[in-house]
Amino acid sequence: MKTKYILLLIAMMTAIGTTAQTWPSPKPEARPGTRWWWLGSAVDHQGLEWNLGEYARVGIGAVEITPLYGVKGNEAHELPFLSPQWMAALRDVQQIAAAHHIEVDMNCGTGWPFGGPEVTIDEAACKAVFVDSMITSDKRPSDQHRLAVPAKERPYAQWQCTRVYPTSQPRQWRVISVYASRTRQKVKRAAPGGEGLVIDHFDRQAVAHYLNRFTQAFEYTKTPYPHTFFNDSYEVYKANWTPSLFDEFLKRRGYDLRDHLPELLDGGDGNKALHDYRETLSDLLYENFTQQWVAWAHRNGVSVRNQAHGSPANLLDLYAAVDIPEIEGFGRSEFGIRGLRRDPGMTLRNYSDVSMLKYASSAAHVMGKPLTSSETLTWLTEHFRTSLSQMKPDIDLMFSCGINHIFFHGSCYTPEHDPWPGWKFYASVDMSPTNSIWRDAPFLMQYIERCQSFLQMGQPDNDFLVYLPVHDMWRIRGPRNDDAKSESKDRSGGEDLLMQFDIHTMDEKCPQFIRSILRIDSLGYDCDYISDRQLAQVKVDGGQLVTPGGTRYRGIIIPTGTTVDDRLQSLLQNLTPYIIYGEDRQAMAHLAKPEPWRMNPGVRMIRRKTDDGYIYFVVNLSPRDCCLNAACLSVPTQHIVCYNPMTGDVNRLPMVADAPVVCLQSGESIILQTGTAADRPLSTGQYGMTLETETLPLDGPWTLSFIDETPRVSETYTMPTPQTWETLGESASVTMGTGVYETAFCLTRKQAAQACIISLGKVYESARVYINGKFIGCAWAAPFQLDCRDALRKGKNTLRIEVTNLPANRIRDLDRRGVEWRKFKEINFVDINYKKTRYDGWQLMRSGLQGAPLLHFYPQTPSAWPSVGATNNKKLNYRMWEVKGS
């Protein structure tokens, strides 16, 4: 076939010079964790042994226990939360997990948010009821007058004050009575023993009483505390008050909010009362909930992992107060990666874009906390349709934004012999042994562990701090919350007081800030956000800014649109030489050198500093293949070692000044470790682009048989080229399992002597490949290619490809046949839009291989670096090079 250039991932090229080196020894937390849903807490020793054994087998290193609603008809086996029986199960888990080297974390509650049976109405989530009326009177009404509260609030409302305000009309008085009422929100998806009211997070006493229940349970049963306590995203609805708010406001803001109620309720954007009210709520949540919870956990020797998003507070301060800040990925990003299966209509937009993902990691970096975790892949796709290949790009995006401690969302405890599909949580992603992706899940887990082993090393090395203009956000009233609009007829008011920093609406609440972050990124710089509280502790040392956690930055950017008032001026007064107003490219270049690779659309990267150099994680999330010049990294280096987290290969790059030496196909990722020491105990290999001398299609004939499949497929199929299963008749179309494609091919002496890559083409959904009986790897993500040189020989060669599909066609078949598998209480079973759904109307999904794989042959010695077009390579050393025909 016609010779052409092809892009090869540098560390993948064992065919053209590899040195077998070891990766850094990963810490236990380098392995991914998973949220472990306990339905009804109906667990037993046998089930715990099986579940934890399966998690350990595939490479999961931590479980976070979150009890939920139960399974219908299984009430006799449920364990009430924190009962002696439940605590005994926790002890059992800890013992079993220790034998498997699995960390045990625990939600400080069931479902979400915090609450339960011990929460009294007087300590439940609180809301303000404003009764607002115009009164005609010759005499000023009394401040002791109480306007009648709406009937449905009367059993719960406590009068706080009445204020009378004169109007422009004679004898007209505006009278506002304020009542502290209760939202009556109950714990969502609560487990047995966890049902009840949500706590008032702003009330110190309510939080203390709530935590005391846990203290008593652990002390009474003498159960060891877990490794980490966890708190889910702040989903407390309409809670815009606490009984002490007026007093707290006066103490913190220096004036009485009761004198400014019309401004609070009616004032437009920029009004002081609204801003100060929101800042007071932020302070109360930070001090009375987050700090108190952390202090309580630390007294018991437990670390804290927290999701702050969704709360009406400065996210950076809440994240900074805990040991492990955690963000959430919600939905799927549309990267356009070539060869990655899309699922139109079956996915949600990922609201956690680059700007959102950086809140948690920013707080961790600024405060010197080594780990940033994520609730990973929530609703990536519909249930039963999520592949390993679809997971990788969004995980890579998280890695590039500073996340280095992945937790899946999640894994559902299920009895080993429960009829398929077993016990399921209503939201995906489903990382469980009953999912067919479990067969090849170890390769994903190993990839994550390899990446995190580097991303947890050293210290963050982002270029700039970016001031978070939260005060400008607090000054904007914004739209009324949809949930609250239905109550407006009661004249209770206050529906638009809260500003909750939730994932789904950040683009509405801070669009200019998001534009600023994306602009900084496009100019080749990385950044972390900083709050007022953190900025007040920044020092200058050695010509750099040093944060409270000891992390160094080149300067601080005040993003476009930020109000620079006296308060901010005071915080910045000693940092003048390091301040940049707006996204000023020249000013940034004066303080820091950009990373040219970051300027390439779709190329994401993050840099960390070690004692002897730097670590880069780089991923190509674009539809294009690209080559990047390692000589133009922004840091000094005398050598670069290249680690391929997909294969485990380790190579050393030659320092060629005018050549592209790192080539990434669409979807590929790489880790680079630089150093300034001239000598390293690692021999130099040969890398880069090389000429493809020949392509050989493997046209067969092929046979297809099945293993580990349900329902059973007894036929063996013969075909000229690989076909997908749904084209082969009823039994193959509905099965879930592994199809084995086999063929033989012959090679000449010259072909067998060359480097070779096998490209599998369209894979639905992951494939283990064996050549001449030798396992050469698992192709589980785009571009579905594997190095196969060492397995080839002259003459006849055998090829075996074991392709594992998704459960979609099997669950479709169950619904078409009326098999009742939906047996869960509460939400049972919903789609990505939270609508109850059945799957009998789904079209059959493709499974297996489609089309003939290709062998790509290359000379053992790479050719000279090819020029790109007619342009001198030196002028392109900071640009992405796209090679046509690859």
Image (spheres, helix red, strand yellow):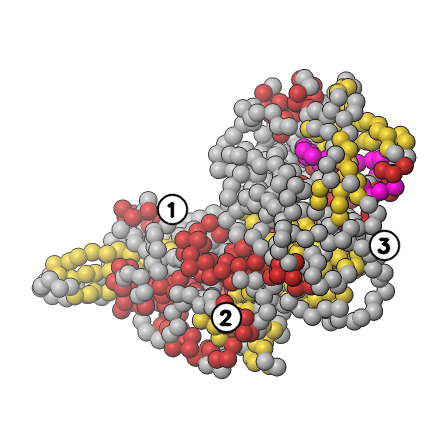
Residue on which the image places disc 1: 483
Position of 465 with respect to 490 (left or right) is right
Quadrant containing the C terminus is top right
Q: Is residue 281 visible?
A: yes
> In terms of depth relative to the viewer, which is nearer, 213 or 621?
621
Q: Give the CA separation, mark 1 to mark 3.
A: 59 Å
Residue depth check, mark 2 versus mark 3: number of the one nearer the observer: 2
- Residue at the image position 49 percent from the left and 75 percent from the top: 579
The kind of secondary structure element at disc 3 is loop
Q: Give the CA separation, mark 2 to mark 3.
A: 44 Å
Quadrant containing the N terminus is top right
Q: Quadrant of residue 814?
A: top right
Asked if the residue under mark 3 is in contact with the one under mark 1, i.e. CB atoms within 8 Å, the reply is no
Label 1 amino acid?
A: Asp
Residue on which the image places disc 3: 20
Q: Is residue 64 above or below residue 346?
A: below
Position of 798 with respect to 817 (left or right) is right
Q: Where are the magenta residues, as a range?
A: 752-775
Q: Give the CA separation, mark 2 to mark 1.
A: 46 Å
Q: Which disc number belongs to residue 586?
A: 2
The rendered magenta stretch, by its main secondary structure, is classed as: strand
